[in-house]
Image (spheres, grey):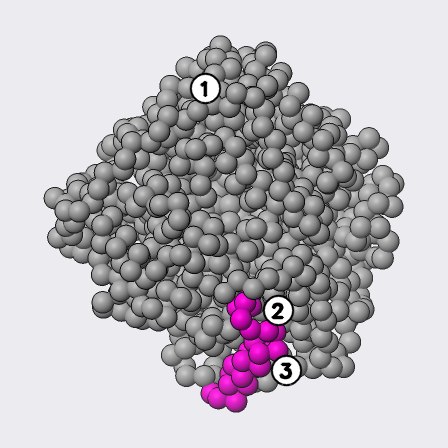
């Protein structure tokens, strides 16, 4: 059985990793099971570079890349993509701007050419920038009415306080209004470049051909101005529980998020916290949280926990959507579960269930090209090594209930929680 | 040509479709029942969906906690969906573990408990699910449009059901629904993945063939009369953003007109993917409506949706309005585009382009075994698997004349409902 899993998982013997002279890392893996190809990647151009008064600039810039280049108008870019059934999109997070695309295998050269064209030579046409601004602003008005989104933004504000992670990547209406076309041009000019860019390709093309195609369109890219990200400040932990409510009138349901900061992806506590989180609010129908809030009490259609770990300090939370009359009841139940989790940890049996789930689900999560692209980027972003998924079962099995308890106690403190509620 | 799948009918009427795919050590197994929200009468709306929830509450052999734990331990993915015409349950598991999925589905076809206490706690879960939907303006608008489009046909109510019914239905109602529809002769099983057909079939026979058949459940036959004119309605609710939902009565999946209408959708609002799992979509920025509405800054987004259903359902176009324009202005520009596709012959190359997009979406969907097993059974719920196999060929047969005729027949004002969402907390932003 182990052999079967091993052969379906990506590893150093079937991933071709190359680094171009400018610094672009390419990860390529063949899959000839269907005649398609998926690309994904990132560049160090995220919202952490944004100033407070122009928050959302990184996102705005990433979205504007496809609005026109020196070679292609907006309509030409999308005519080339959509006529072949291909797709390409950009977005931005805190540390990086990301992109994802797919095409029939025969159209990979076209997809990469458009990617390179829009990265190298976007022209940010004025009319397109204004159109995009209205679309972003409309998205922000919809966000302001979304109870789950507003609870999540408020939760981050409590947990991260003065840390830059407290800011929503896509900004606020007034900061989007403050951004000019020149800001987009300058942001692109300064930050977009090959250093730190990673590109993963998986699909029905020979990996050497994939790497050659990338080199031919992106190999000559240079940008000497790319600045390093200033060091992130230390995260100050909460001294007591902080509760904040956002009123959104007229809604039928309230959303709540309860939790605290969490480990970074590269911290040793990541794996035990991840398995602990599974027991707390993921395994099966959302673990213990699902059992108590949904199944036993019938309070919510969704109630679960999440561990969000990245380059800097992460977060660990429980979220649920409940009838406004049941907010306090749900909050109490969640608090009791978090307390029990921190007090007693997990049983050997519970841990074993989640370990088995983590290992058993690998073939499914790595079945599609998109799943493999995501795993390749994960290995690169966090220096996990190209054989990470082959070593993964052993890494998972090595965790003990004591490791989980220690991780839970390090991050979750029932008397120092962030509680965000958005609803009518 | 050798068939890529095999079809079998068990003695009790259970239809089984099997497709070997040896690309990953996975098997995806789906059990489909011919029951959905179209089988519900007033007072019992939402019963099919609630019944689906109750199927996760356990049997004497597989109590809820054991069931859930067993699938999750083995790294499986499982879930269920209720639609207008069908309800389906699936498990995708590592190859050597699929036996568990097959066993639990055989067991819960007959032995689900529908415990009274569980019914009580699930009632509020379903109501909470509905309240979550109600938070979305698009849901509120879509529900109103659907209600207005169907006065007679049971497609008129939302799958999740109406609140008074969710409050009043009881355990016996749910159990009786379960016993009436969850029988092998009302079900189709579709399995795709890493197995040998003869071994899989033998195993399925062992597990399922002894389940007794029941009386074939009747389906409600209340065809919707032709619309007598355009319906317009307004929904008011919280928010700052206005929406339009323009829904036309559309052909059933088995109607030859379904294919030209699919191409119309692709040209007007961009290609839609019918894949349930994986694949992703194609953007629609070169579609006619995007150019006419979004590029002209009358709207910020436009999306089209067509459903493959047994009876005629709706072709819906949902538009998010630009804050500087009102629904009358947007509708006028929209109607110009509709008139253009009705009056002018579409160049054949635009149709060829739509076919290439559909082929690409098919290729993306084929990456994943769960999606392949989904199609194997899904097409059986409104037609046969052959519908899926010949889908691309049928699209390719659509001519400019077919397209124009379909546009004239279906996209006329008297065949539609126009719903407008008016946000009540409007403020000037631009």
Residue of label 1: A272
Give the mark toward the camera: 3 or 1.
1
B317 part of magenta stretch: no
- Describe residue B209's horizontal placement relative to residue A219 as left or right: right
Residue of label 3: B412
Residue at x 25%, y 55% (from the top left corner): A186
Say above or below: A225 vs A407. Answer: below
**C-alpha distance separating marks 2 and 1:** 48 Å
B338 part of magenta stretch: yes
Q: Is residue A11 visible?
A: no
**C-alpha distance separating marks 3 and 2:** 17 Å
Residue A316 location (% of width, % of height): 51, 28
Give the mark toward the camera: 2 or 1.
2
Residue at x 71%, y 63% (from the top left corner): B236
Residue range highlighted in magenta: B320-345
Say above or below: A234 vs B389. Answer: above
Name the magenta segment's main secondary structure: helix
Residue of label 2: B244
């Amino acid at each position: 059985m182990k052999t079967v899993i091993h052969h379906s998982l990506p590893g150093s013997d079937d991933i071709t990793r190359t680094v171009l002279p400018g610094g672009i890392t390419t990860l390529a893996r063949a899959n000839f099971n269907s005649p398609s190809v998926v690309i994904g990647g990132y560049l160090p151009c995220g919202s952490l570079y944004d100033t407070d008064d122009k928050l959302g600039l990184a996102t705005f810039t990433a979205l504007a890349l496809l609005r026109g280049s020196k070679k292609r108008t907006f309509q030409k870019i999308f005519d080339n993509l959509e006529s072949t059934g291909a797709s390409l999109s950009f977005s931005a997070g805190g540390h990086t701007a990301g992109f994802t695309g797919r095409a029939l295998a025969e159209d990979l050269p076209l997809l990469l050419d458009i990617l390179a064209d829009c990265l190298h030579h976007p022209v940010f046409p004025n009319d397109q920038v204004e159109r995009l601004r209205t679309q972003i602003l409309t998205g922000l008005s919809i966000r302001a009415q979304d109870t789950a989104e507003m609870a999540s933004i408020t939760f981050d504000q409590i947990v991260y306080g003065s840390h830059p992670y407290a800011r929503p990547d896509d900004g606020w209406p007034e900061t989007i209004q403050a951004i000019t076309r020149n800001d987009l041009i300058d942001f692109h000019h300064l930050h977009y470049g090959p250093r730190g860019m990673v590109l993963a390709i998986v699909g029905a093309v020979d990996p050497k051909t994939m790497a050659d195609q990338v080199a031919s369109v992106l190999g000559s890219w240079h940008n000497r101005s790319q600045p390093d990200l200033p060091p992130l400040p230390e995260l100050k932990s909460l001294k007591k529980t902080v509760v904040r409510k956002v009123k959104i009138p007229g809604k039928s349901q309230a959303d709540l998020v309860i939790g605290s900061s969490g480990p970074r992806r590269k911290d040793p506590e990541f794996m035990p916290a991840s398995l602990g989180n599974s027991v707390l609010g993921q395994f099966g129908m959302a673990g213990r949280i699902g059992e108590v809030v949904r199944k036993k009490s019938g309070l919510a259609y969704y109630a679960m926990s999440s561990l969000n770990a990245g380059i800097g300090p992460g977060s660990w939370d429980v979220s649920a959507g409940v009838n406004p009359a049941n907010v306090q009841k749900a909050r109490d139940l969640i608090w009791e579960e978090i307390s029990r989790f921190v007090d007693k940890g997990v049983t050997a049996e519970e841990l074993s269930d989640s370990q088995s789930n983590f290992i058993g689900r690998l073939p499914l999560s790595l079945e599609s090209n998109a799943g493999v692209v995501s795993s390749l980027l994960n290995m690169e972003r966090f220096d996990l090594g190209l054989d990470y998924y082959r070593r993964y079962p052993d890494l998972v099995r090595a965790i003990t209930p004591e490791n989980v308890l220690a991780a839970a106690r390090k991050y979750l403190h029932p008397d120092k929680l962030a509680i965000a509620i958005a609803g009518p | 040509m050798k068939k890529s799948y095999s079809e079998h009918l068990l003695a009790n009427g259970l239809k089984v479709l099997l497709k070997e795919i040896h690309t990953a050590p996975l098997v995806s197994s789906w059990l489909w029942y011919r029951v959905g929200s179209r089988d519900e009468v007033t007072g019992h709306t939402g019963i099919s969906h609630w019944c689906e929830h109750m199927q996760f509450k356990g049997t004497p052999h597989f109590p809820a906690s054991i069931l859930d734990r067993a699938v999750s331990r083995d790294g499986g993915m499982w879930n269920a969906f209720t639609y207008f015409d069908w309800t389906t349950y699936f498990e995708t598991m590592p190859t050597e573990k699929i036996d568990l999925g097959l066993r639990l589905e055989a067991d819960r076809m007959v032995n689900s408990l529908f415990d009274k206490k569980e019914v009580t706690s699930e009632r509020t879960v379903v109501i909470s699910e509905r309240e979550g939907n109600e938070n979305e303006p698009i849901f509120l608008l879509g529900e109103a449009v659907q209600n207005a489009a169907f006065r007679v046909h049971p497609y008129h109510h939302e799958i999740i059901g109406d609140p008074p019914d969710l409050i009043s239905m009881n355990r016996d109602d749910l159990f009786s629904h379960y016993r009436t529809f969850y029988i092998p002769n009302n079900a189709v099983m579709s399995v795709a993945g890493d197995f040998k057909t003869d071994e899989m079939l033998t195993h399925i026979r062992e597990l399922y063939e002894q389940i007794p058949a029941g009386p074939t459940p009747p389906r409600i036959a209340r065809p919707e009369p032709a619309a007598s004119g355009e319906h317009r309605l307004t929904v008011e609710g919280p928010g700052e953003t206005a929406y339009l939902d323009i829904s036309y009565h559309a052909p059933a999946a088995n109607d030859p007109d379904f294919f030209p209408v699919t191409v119309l959708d692709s040209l007007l609002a961009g290609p839609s993917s019918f894949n349930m799992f994986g694949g992703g979509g194609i953007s629609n920025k070169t579609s006619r409506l995007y150019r006419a509405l979004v590029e002209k800054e009358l709207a910020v987004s436009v999306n089209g949706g067509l459903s493959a259903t047994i009876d005629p359902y709706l072709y819906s176009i949902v538009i998010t309005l630009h804050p500087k324009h009102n629904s009358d202005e947007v509708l006028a520009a929209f109607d110009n585009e509709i008139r253009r596709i009705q009056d002018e012959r579409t160049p054949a190359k635009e149709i060829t382009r739509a076919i290439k997009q559909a082929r690409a979406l098919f290729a993306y969907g084929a990456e994943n075994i769960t999606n392949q097993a989904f199609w194997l059974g899904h097409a059986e719920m409104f037609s046969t698997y052959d519908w899926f196999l010949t889908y691309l060929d049928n699209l390719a047969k659509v001519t400019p004349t077919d397209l124009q005729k379909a546009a004239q027949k279906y996209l006329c004002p008297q065949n539609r409902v126009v719903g407008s969402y008016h946000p009540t907390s409007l403020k000037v932003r631009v």
